[in-house]
């Protein structure tokens, strides 16, 4: 009986002293934008920016119609109250050192090439993205 009580006490003590977030307190946010809708793109960039400001590392993957956010000469509407476009917020994330990539199949399946991308945007490779997505500290959101 004493052994069982000692075991229970040890387990309770362990749970009382261990934080829910273990190895690394840094949150990572993986934002995948596939929508062609500029308002949806804007909300994705607003949430990514706010998450970064609150300490999260942000990685953005632009696929399908969402890949157009990566095209330097594309024109996007501005939204209130920020008075900015989703691409402007995307550029702001990049200026803060956040990673932005287009899907590996975006460029080969559109009329665009690497020279059309905003400087600093790369092409994501599926093995690296899969490895990143499997990390326990990464939260995944798609828009």
Image (cartoon, rainbow, N blue to C red):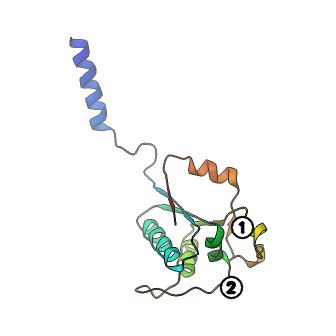
Q: Is residue 133 above or below residue 66?
A: above
Of badges 2 and 1, nearer the viewer stands 1
What is the crowding at mark 2: few (fewer than 14 residues within 10 Å), some, or many (at least 20)?
A: few
Residue at (26% x, 30% y) in the render? 12
* Secondary element type, mark 1: loop
Which quadrant of the view contains residue 105?
bottom right
- Relative to residue 89, is residue 14 depicted above or below? above
Q: Residue at x 45, y 55 (%)?
A: 27
- Residue designated by label 2: 73
* Res. 37 image quadrant: bottom right
Residue 124, position in %: x, y? 68, 60
Q: Nearer the viewer, residue 86 or 53?
A: 86
Q: Is residue 100 left or right of residue 9?
A: right
**Nearest the camera: 60 or 13?**
60
Left or right for 110, reference 45: right
Q: Position of residue 74 (x, y in %)?
A: 65, 84
Given the current orientation, which residue lies at the most extreme top position? 1
Residue beneath disc 1: 106
Which of these two is toward me, 106 or 122? Answer: 106
């Amino acid at each position: 009986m004493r052994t069982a009580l000692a075991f229970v006490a040890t387990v309770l003590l362990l749970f009382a002293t261990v934080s829910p977030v273990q190895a690394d307190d840094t949150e990572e946010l993986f934002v995948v934008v596939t929508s062609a809708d500029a308002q949806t793109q804007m909300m994705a960039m607003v949430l990514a920016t706010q998450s970064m400001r609150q300490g999260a590392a942000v990685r953005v993957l632009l696929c399908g119609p969402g890949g157009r956010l990566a095209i330097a000469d594309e024109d996007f509407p501005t939204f209130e109250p920020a008075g900015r476009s989703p691409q402007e917020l995307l550029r702001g994330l990049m200026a803060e050192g956040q990673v932005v990539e287009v899907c590996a199949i975006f460029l080969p399946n559109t009329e665009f090439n690497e020279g059309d991308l905003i400087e600093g945007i790369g092409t994501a490779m599926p093995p690296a993205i899969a490895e990143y997505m499997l990390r326990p500290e990464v939260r995944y959101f798609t828009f």
